[in-house]
Image: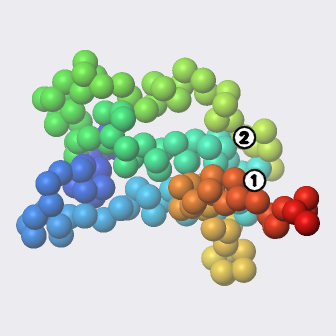
Amino acid sequence: MCAGHPLRSRLGHYRRSPQTEKDFCPTLLLFLECVYQLHQQQPSLLELNALLLLMVAQHAQTLLFGTFLCNCEAERRRLDLRGHTESLWSYINADVEEYKNPFYAPERVDQNKVYANPTLIRMRPWEELHMRWLLPMLNNKKSGPDENVT
């Protein structure tokens, strides 16, 4: 992001028009989905957990943090985002232990090879992200008819 990935344009954080519509492409969200799938297949590979991925994916869209509001560092400086918004990274770093993966095993990671199986049978839906609004409703429903009714 510091290297200048155009987050604002790619995530669509501006008024849409035919001219700006062509820039929209949720590359960051696609990348996070890939990392999530890798994390599901190889839980000891990543030092940080899926909750961190979820936080980044959610807040890339919520605009609660200034982290994803601009296209480049120069734009961030010009708008003085550090003085006017909180960084998602500062928020995460304040409680970094919550985002650490307890299964992380650096001694088991081959730095030269990372394998992921892209077949559908190995893929897991990222329910915490894609179904986050539906899951509370499903969990609150009764599982069947009331047994006390006669």
Q: CA distance from mark 2 to mark 1?
A: 8 Å
Quadrant of the drawing holding the C terminus? bottom right
In-image side of 47 versus 85 (left or right): right
Residue 113 in sight: no
Element assignment for label 1:
loop
- At a point 30% along the width and 55% down the height, the residue shown is 11
Q: Is residue 11 above or below residue 58?
A: below
131 w.r.t. 92: above or below: below
Dot placed on the residue nearer the N-terminal end, 2 or 1: 1
Q: Are marks 2 and 1 in contact (CB under 8 Å)?
A: yes
Type of residue at label 2?
A: Asn
> Badge 2 is on which residue?
101
Q: Quadrant of the N terminus?
A: top left
Residue 109 placement, left or right of 62: right
**Residue 69: x and y, percent?**
26, 41
The amino acid sitting under disc 1 is Pro
Rendered residue at 60%/23% (across/down): 95
Q: Is residue 22 visible?
A: yes
Residue 74 vs residue 94: left or right?
A: left
Work out whether residue 149 or residue 87 is closer to the camera in this orientation and state it.
149
The count of marks equals: 2
Front one among 145 and 48: 145
Residue under circle 1? 43
- Where's residue 55, x and y in %? 52, 42
Q: Residue at x 16, y 36 (%)?
A: 75
Quadrant housing residue 96: top right
Question: In terms of image quadrants, where is residue 87?
Answer: top left
Element assignment for label 2: loop
Q: How is the image coloured?
A: rainbow
Question: Counting other residues with Cα less than 10 Å from the Cα at mark 1, is it few (<14), some (14-19), or many (20 or more)?
Answer: some
